[in-house]
Amino acid sequence: MCRSVLVVDDNRSFRDAARQLLERGGFVVVAEAENGYEGIRQAAAHQPDIAIVDVQLPDIDGFEVAEQISGLDVSVRVILTSSLDGADFGALVVDSPAAGFVPKAELSSSAIEALLVPSP
């Protein structure tokens, strides 16, 4: 199943690496954004299945991006990412509308798929 993805990260190298990794895994990257507000605009415009969102963005944080995307009239599953460990963010990840968190070093198609599987 081909799924569309938006990658929101201020680091061009990470966006390029994520695009390659995701496309090899069968995903289609339909848009990229280098900050949170642009990510929200791209989510509204492209309505991807998934948005990979960096927690630490230059304008607003990824938690706010997840909140705003979840408020759009689109069905986008947000997955947060960071070079920091998820434990560094405590309950912020759990309390957010995001489907989950994947450290940047562990980003893979299988890690994304695991977060998208409905809980029993």
Image (tube, rainbow, N blue to C red):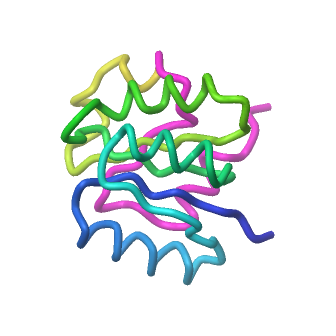
**Residue at 52%, 63% in the rendered image:** 31
Where in the figure is residue 66, as x and y percent of width and height? 48, 31
The residue nearer to you, when weighing 84 against 3, is 3
Name the residue rendered at 41%, 61% in the picture. 107
Q: Is residue 70 above or below residue 101?
A: above
Residue 89 occupies which quadrant of the picture?
top left
Q: How many marks?
A: 0
Q: What is the quadrant of the N terminus in the image?
A: bottom right
Residue 65 percent location from the top left of the image: 43, 32
Q: Is residue 18 above or below residue 57?
A: below
Q: Nearer the viewer, residue 95 or 55?
A: 55
On screen, residue 48 versus residue 80, left or right, reads: right
Q: Residue at x 31, y 57 (%)?
A: 104
Q: Is residue 99 above or below residue 20?
A: above
Q: Quadrant of residue 25?
A: bottom right
Q: Position of residue 43 (x, y in %)?
A: 57, 46
Q: Residue at x 61, y 22 (%)?
A: 71
User: Of residues 78 and 58, which is closer to you in this image?
Assistant: 58
Q: Position of residue 52 (x, y in %)?
A: 47, 51
Q: Report the quarter where the C terminus lies.
A: top right
Tell whether 41 sits left or right of 60. right
Up the image or down, 109 lies above or below 96; here it is below
Assess whether residue 38 is covered by the magenta stretch. Answer: no
Residue 104 drawn in magenta: yes
Q: Which residues are magenta?
A: 95-120
